[in-house]
C-alpha cells in the first residue's frame, strides 16, 4: 500500500484520479506480463521489466525497483550462456501447446510444498537418505497421478495451472462501480486519507533515477557472486 508521507494536497489536484490512473496502468502492465509468460516470450518480458522498474521507482516501491534493477544488471554482465538461460528458461509448459506456459518460480513453489508435506513424517531427521527417499517417492507419486489421469480420462488440475474464467462480468462490475464513485473524473481537492500517488508519477526524474541506478550498480559489482561468474570487465 502506498502511504501518504505528509505531502501537501493542492486544491487544484485530484489525488483520487492520480491513484486510479496508477492502478489502471499497473493493471495493464500485469495483463501484458501474464500474456508474455503464457506465450513464453522471454525477450519482450525483459523489456517489460525495464519499464516496470521505472514505474516501481516512481511509485516509491524501492524493493521492487531494486529487484528489477538487479535483473537488468544480470542481463548486462553475466556470461552469454547464463544470460540466455535467464531470458528463455523462465517458463514451463505442461500441455505442450501454444499459449500455455507457466512461470518456473510458481512451479517450484508447488514442488516445495509437495516436498515439505512428505518430509514431515521424518520429524526433523533430515538425513541424506531421508531426502533421497522423499524425492524418489514424490516423483513416483506424480507419475502415478499422470498415468491415472491418462488412463481414466479424469480431468485434474495440474501443478501451476488455473481454471480460466470469462473476466468480462467482473470487469464490467468494476467499471460500473468506478463510474458511480467518479474515479475517472477530475474533481479538484479529492484525496485518500492513507493513500498518496504523486501527480508526476508518469514523469521520469532523470537525476533521481540515475542516482538510484549508480548507487546500486556499485553495490552489485562488489557482490562475490558476480565477481565469480562474470567474465567481462565491470569497470
Image (tube, rainbow, N blue to C red):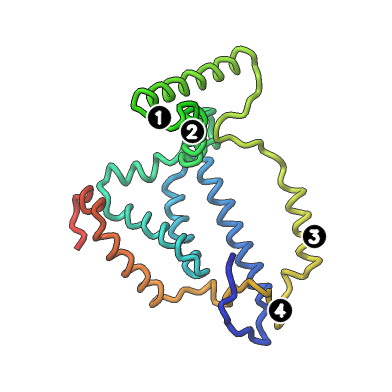
Q: Residues within 10 Å of mark 4 (few under 14, many from 20)?
A: some
When the figure is inspected, residue 15 is found, relative to residue 178, above or below; the finding is below
Please tell me in which quadrant of the rendered image residue 24 appears. bottom right
**Residue depicted at x 56% and y 19%:** 145
Label 1 close to label 2 by CB (< 8 Å): no
Q: Helix, strand or loop at disc 2?
A: helix
Q: Earlier in the sequence, mark 4 or mark 2?
A: 2
Q: Residues within 10 Å of mark 2 (few under 14, many from 20)?
A: few
Label 4 close to label 2 by CB (< 8 Å): no
Query: Disc 1 vs disc 4: which is toward the camera?
Result: 1
Q: Earlier in the sequence, mark 1 or mark 2?
A: 2
Residue labelled with disc 4: 190
Q: Earlier in the sequence, mark 3 or mark 2?
A: 2
Decide which of 29, 219 is in the foreground and name it: 219
Decide if residue 66 is on the left or right side of residue 235.
right
Pinpoint residue 231: horizontal percent, then vertical percent.
19, 50
Quarter of the figure that contains the C terminus: bottom left
When the figure is inspected, residue 5 is found, relative to residue 152, above or below; the finding is below
Residue labelled with disc 3: 176
Query: Disc 4 vs disc 3: which is toward the camera?
Result: 4
**Residue depicted at x 65% and y 16%:** 153
Q: Measure the C-alpha gap from mark 1 to mark 4.
A: 59 Å
Residue labelled with disc 1: 125
Q: Helix, strand or loop at disc 1?
A: loop
Q: Measure the C-alpha gap from mark 1 to mark 3.
A: 56 Å
Please tell me in which quadrant of the rendered image residue 217 appears. bottom left
Pinpoint residue 154: horizontal percent, then vertical percent.
65, 19
Residue labelled with disc 2: 116
Amino acid at each position: 500500500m502506498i502511504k501518504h508521507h505528509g505531502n501537501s494536497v493542492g486544491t487544484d489536484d485530484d489525488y483520487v484520479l492520480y491513484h486510479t490512473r496508477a492502478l489502471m496502468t499497473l493493471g495493464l502492465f500485469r495483463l501484458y506480463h501474464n500474456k508474455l509468460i503464457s506465450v513464453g516470450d522471454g525477450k519482450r518480458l525483459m523489456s517489460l521489466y525495464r519499464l516496470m522498474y521505472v514505474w516501481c521507482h516512481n511509485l516509491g516501491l524501492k524493493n521492487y525497483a531494486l529487484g528489477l534493477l538487479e535483473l537488468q544488471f544480470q542481463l548486462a554482465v553475466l556470461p552469454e550462456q547464463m544470460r540466455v538461460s535467464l531470458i528463455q528458461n523462465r517458463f514451463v509448459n505442461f500441455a505442450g501447446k501454444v499459449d500455455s506456459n507457466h512461470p518456473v518460480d510458481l512451479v517450484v513453489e508447488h514442488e516445495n510444498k509437495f516436498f515439505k508435506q512428505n518430509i514431515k513424517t521424518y520429524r526433523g531427521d533430515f538425513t541424506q537418505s531421508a531426502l533421497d527417499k522423499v524425492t524418489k517417492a514424490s516423483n513416483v507419486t506424480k507419475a502415478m497421478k499422470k498415468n491415472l489421469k491418462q488412463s481414466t480420462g479424469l480431468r485434474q488440475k495440474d501443478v501451476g495451472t488455473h481454471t480460466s474464467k470469462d473476466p468480462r462480468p467482473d470487469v464490467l462490475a468494476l467499471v460500473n462501480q468506478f463510474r458511480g464513485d467518479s474515479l475517472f473524473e477530475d474533481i479538484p481537492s479529492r484525496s485518500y486519507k492513507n493513500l498518496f500517488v504523486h501527480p508526476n508519477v508518469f514523469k521520469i526524474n532523470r537525476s533521481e533515477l540515475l542516482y538510484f541506478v549508480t548507487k546500486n550498480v556499485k553495490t552489485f559489482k562488489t557482490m562475490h557472486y558476480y565477481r565469480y561468474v562474470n567474465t567481462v570487465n565491470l569497470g
